[in-house]
Image: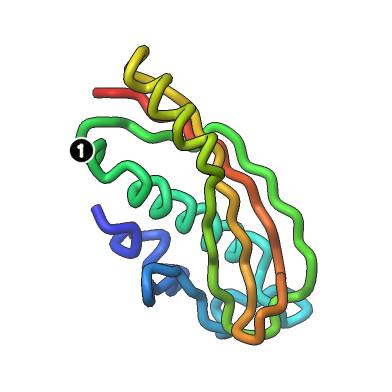
Amino acid sequence: MKATDIPFVRHLGIEEENSKLSLDFKNDVLNHIETIHASAQFALAETQSGIHLQKLFPELEGKVLPVLRDAQIKYRKPAQEKIIAFASTDAEDVAKFRSQFEKRGRASIQINVEVKDINGVLTSQATFTWFVQAL
């Protein structure tokens, strides 16, 4: 399933452009001070981490069950514009994941996500730990 087809993701209005997910600044996702709600930023970052996981290991799609095990997020600046999520993973973590998965049929990996507005202002940073198990 494509991440942007997940009903909750569609409900928020998260869209994919150039392999990055974005969320428009609109009334439906604003909080009481008229900035993008923390939970909407979290959903954008978490969804981007899942897409990043799929891109790292396309050969596992349909053969594993990935489950989010842990998440940490820090909100840096109010999101007052459209926001875009950027994911990354250390090469060492990818190699460690591959090794563990080959040996055990399960492994965990950490994915880092930065959420920035369209002017490049960092609004939040998150780390997601995914547990992946062979079906």
Amino acid at pointer 1: Gly
- The answer to which image quadrant residue 107 occupies is top left
Residue tagged 1 = 62
Q: Is residue 113 above or below residue 26?
A: above
Q: Is residue 13 above or below residue 91?
A: below
Answer left or right for 113 relative to 60: right
Residue at the image point whose x is 40% and y is 46% from the top? 53
Residue at the image point whose x is 79% and y is 72% from the top? 77
Q: Is residue 74 above or below residue 41?
A: above
Which element type, helix, strand or loop, lies under badge 1? loop
Answer left or right for 36 relative to 2: right
Q: Position of residue 89 (x, y in %)?
A: 53, 47
Q: Position of residue 1 (x, y in %)?
A: 24, 52
Q: What's the coloring here?
A: rainbow
Q: Position of residue 55 (x, y in %)?
A: 34, 51
In the rendered image, which quarter contains the C terminus? top left
Closer to the camera in the image, 64 or 40: 64
Residue at the image point whose x is 56% and y is 85% from the top? 26
Closer to the camera in the image, 24 or 114: 114
Closer to the camera in the image, 35 or 79: 79
Residue at the image point whose x is 40% and y is 22% from the top? 99
Tell how many labels. Answer: 1
Q: Position of residue 127 (x, y in %)?
A: 63, 46
Answer left or right for 108 relative to 6: right
Answer left or right for 74 relative to 37: right
Q: Residues within 10 Å of mark 1 (few under 14, many from 20)?
A: few
For the view shown, which residue lies furthest in the top direction? 104
- The answer to which image quadrant residue 110 occupies is top right
